[in-house]
Amino acid sequence: MKTTFYTLAVLSLLLNASCNRADPSGDEAPESAASAAATDTTAAPAHQVTLSADEQALAAVRTGPLTQRVLGGGLKVNGVLDVPPDQLIAISAPLGGIVERTSLLQGTRVRKGQVLATIRNPEFIQLQQSYLETQSQLTYAKAELDRQRELVREEAAPAKNLQRAQAEYGALQAQAAGQQARLRLAGLPMGSRPFVSTATLRAPKDAFVKTVNVTVGQSVTPTDALFELVDPDHLHVELTVFEKDVPQLKKGQRIRFTLPNDSSAERIARIYLIGRTVDEQQRTVRVHGHLDREKDPALLPGMFVRAVVETTNRRVAALPDKAVVGYEGKQYVFRQEPAAAGKQVFQMLEVRRGEQAGGYSEVFIPNADTTGQYVTEGAYVLLSKLKNPSEE
């Protein structure tokens, strides 16, 4: 009974105090209103961070999905970007001559059929003259052949005359065909007047000028390479692998490679050919890989690359190393949640880190959303905002 009486007395005092605070004429009314307002405000969950669009841009927060990667089973190698032999073109003047005009510079982009240089050669005039003379002789030989056929049919001439006429006509046809080929090879017109003493060298395909080996006025021979063109549309990766590591390689294995000046952008290739000879000095083997994306404007022949050959098929869920943050001995990542009240929401999740390689970490996320977006850059900014709310 005493306990019950004591309890009722305490409740009575609390109710009276509550009534006094609720009195709008009392001195405590403003404080009561403020407390009520604070109570009505919905507090953010303890493991969520909200950012406006401007805050997200200022903090450079970026998101991405979980990626399936091979970690811990890769072979690290170096190499270069190269092109196959059929994409390297040496341009020469088939009949030689003197370079009269060229404006090419190293690195110039040329289109198929574009004029590369103009070559002057007095022999070009003789070629055109000889061709026209042969054409005239062919006309006469054809008429003579027809006449001998008619005479033989009428038994007015021996058959050997017809045979001689046929032989002469065939020889002139062969001579004319050879002259046509030489004119075509030199890029000269056939059967036109006046004669020209210059010929143009044209690009056989779209390409870039790799080297320029001539100057205006230089005398060149048919064996001189005036220009070297390269078509970078079919680049491949040439890796240098030590002979002790070659048994780990197989055709079709994935190659992840980066450029020294852009290690964040990873590109993919696949082993297409493994060399069958070992360099006697370096004890290495050349490995040829085809790119998944060939026409990449950032890639140029001769560029040095750092690569990892995936020698195992075990793939794990991974995020960039900087996506995983540590706090009080535990590891966390931030998952992007649906926006609320015009702000982006990020949920902090505890994870366990596994293998690390190539700037990525294997992550074990309880009930992981494999289709969700996770913070890949700016995770430490979110952690700081969550654990130090006074800084907001």
Image: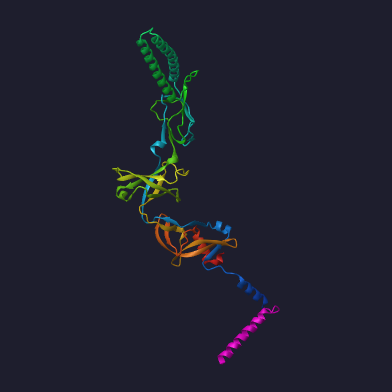
**Hey, which residue is sitting farthest right in the picture?**
25
Q: Residue at x 45, y 40 (%)?
A: 233
In the picture, the quarter occupied by the N terminus is: bottom right
User: Would residue 238 appear left or right of 332 to someone viewing this image?
Assistant: left
Q: Residue at x 39, y 11 (%)?
A: 153
Magenta: predominant secondary structure element?
helix
Asked if residue 155 lies in the magenta stretch, the reply is: no
Q: Is residue 259 above or below residue 22?
A: above
Residue 341 in the image: x percent, y percent? 60, 63
Q: Is residue 108 above or below residue 290?
A: above
**Hey, which residue is sitting farthest top in the picture?**
156
**Hey, which residue is sitting farthest bottom in the picture?**
1
Residue 4 in the image: x percent, y percent? 57, 90
Q: Is residue 366 above or below residue 145?
A: below
Q: How is the image coloured?
A: rainbow
Residue 242 in the image: x percent, y percent? 32, 48
User: Would residue 317 appear left or right of 389 to someone viewing this image?
Assistant: left
User: Would residue 234 appear left or right of 51 to someone viewing this image?
Assistant: left
Residue 333 shows in this picture: yes
Q: Nearer the viewer, residue 312 or 350?
A: 312
In the picture, the quarter occupied by the C terminus is: bottom right
Asked if residue 8 lies in the magenta stretch, the reply is: yes
Residue 326 shows in this picture: no
**Hey, which residue is sitting farthest front in the picture?**
154
Q: Nearer the viewer, residue 153 or 215?
A: 153
Q: Which residues are magenta?
A: 1-27
Q: Is residue 293 above or below residue 90?
A: below
